[in-house]
Amino acid sequence: MFEIRVICAPAEADKVTQALAETFTTGPVRQYPTRDGDRVRVYVTAEQRLSHWPAPETAYAKAPSIISEIGWTARGARDCLHGFQIRELWLRKAALLDRIALDGERHHVPGDAAALAVEAARRLMDLDDAAGLGPSGYADGPYTPDHPDSVREPRGYVRQEYAIWIGKQ
């Protein structure tokens, strides 16, 4: 837990408090005037918000092996030219790269797997954002591709979408 102090114009205090509450788990807000009386001091106790994304173990519990998914995505990339579902390809590719990155992070293996996983996740988010709402768009997860949390954690968005997708298989 930590405390945040912000000095701002009185008219901005509510917006600042709202933004902090969207980013952190916050406690009571205390507000005091500054010595000059023109601004206010806003004090908020805060904690880092725990991740609301599915844990990798949960999202990928029913996933095929990494080796199997490598073969599937290679075939999927080839078949993509023949009317294959492009969203499924990017969803499974992003999930595969996330799983590889997670394994590397667990075993402290240097490399660019995490960067590639983020890049693939952003590509999926771009596809989902372009498709919009509804059956042809992204799955019915609580966080849309343009949600600030999705933008901040693209790999979390992949886990959300993969968990929903594989649950329907």
Image: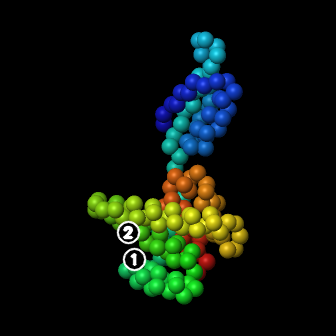
Q: Are marks 1 and 2 in contact (CB under 8 Å)?
A: yes
Q: Secondary structure at mark 1?
A: helix
Image coordinates of residue 51 in percent, x first then y, are: 52, 53
Query: Farthest residue in the front direction?
Result: 81
Name the residue type under label 2.
Ile
Q: Is residue 132 visible?
A: yes
User: Does residue 162 sit above or below 2 in this rendering?
Assistant: below
Q: Which image quadrant for residue 28? A: top right
Q: Is residue 54 visible?
A: no
Q: Secondary structure at mark 2?
A: helix
Image coordinates of residue 146 in percent, x first then y, are: 61, 57
Q: Residue at x 67, y 66 (%)?
A: 132
Query: Badge 1, how many Cα within 10 Å: few under 14, some, many 20+?
Result: some
Name the residue type under label 1.
Ile
Q: Residue at x 66, y 29 (%)?
A: 12
128 and 71: which one is in front? 128
**What residue would you read off at disc 1?**
66
Q: Residue at x 51, y 73 (%)?
A: 90
Q: Which mark is residue 100?
A: 2
